[in-house]
Amino acid sequence: MQPNKDNKRNMKIGIVGTSRYGIVSDDVVQKQIEQSYRDLLQKVGDSNDMEIVYGGGHVPMAYFHYALEKNVPTTQFICNRVKTRPKESQTIIVGKQWGDESVAFLQYIDGLIKIGGGQQSEKEKNQFLQLKPDALFLEYELPLI
């Protein structure tokens, strides 16, 4: 947990979405990230009150880089198979195989943003909404190219 300037607990916002590179437009990914961030700020109020929690793959890593530009604290939540581990981010490793981290990730976060994604993202969205039905949830389409 990374406290904000007032030593309050940051709202942890999980990011899920399209993980494969080359199947969606990078420009559209960036536009959806920017839109989701604006929408998130309207709900949360201040970037000092949040932390972005992401995994591996295209959209989550792109969101990490965007959060870095905005000076928003980040935590990478991954299984041991993910080899990209930015030094600018705290890393939490759960399990050895893809998806082993999902339940712990969903319990860790307070809100969820889904941008595109396949079966795994949809599964995590549905599990999150069952686990935390009143939590912040934002979803954005990401057309395949």
Image (cartoon, grey):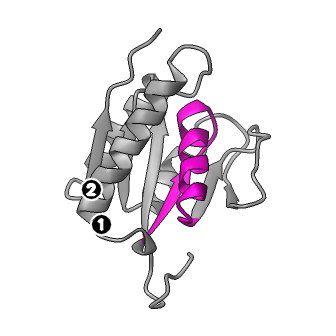
Residue 93: percent from left, percent from top: 70, 54
Inspect this view and state whether residue 120 appears.
Answer: no
Magenta residues, start to end: 50-73
Which badge, 2 or 1, is on the more N-terminal residue?
1
Q: Please, what is the three-letter code of the amino acid marked with disc 1?
A: Val
Q: Nearer the viewer, residue 82 or 2?
A: 2
Tell me: 76 left or right of 33.
right
Q: Nearer the viewer, mark 2 or mark 1?
A: 1
Magenta stretch holds residue 77: no
Q: Nearer the viewer, residue 83 or 81?
A: 83
Look at the image and tell me in which quarter the N terminus lies.
Answer: bottom right
Tell me: 123 left or right of 65.
left
Q: Nearer the viewer, residue 87 or 16?
A: 87
> What residue is shown with label 2?
136
Picture residue at 53% right of the left edge, 35% below the top: 59
Residue 27: percent from left, percent from top: 49, 26
Tell me: 36 left or right of 100.
left
> What residue is shown with label 1?
44
Picture residue at 50% right of the left edge, 18% below the top: 24
Q: Please, what is the three-letter code of the amino acid marked with disc 2?
A: Leu
The residues bearing labels 2 and 1 have C-alpha atoms spaced at a distance of: 9 Å
Inspect this view and state whether residue 10 appears.
Answer: yes
Q: Is residue 118 above or below residue 100?
A: above
Residue 101: percent from left, percent from top: 59, 47
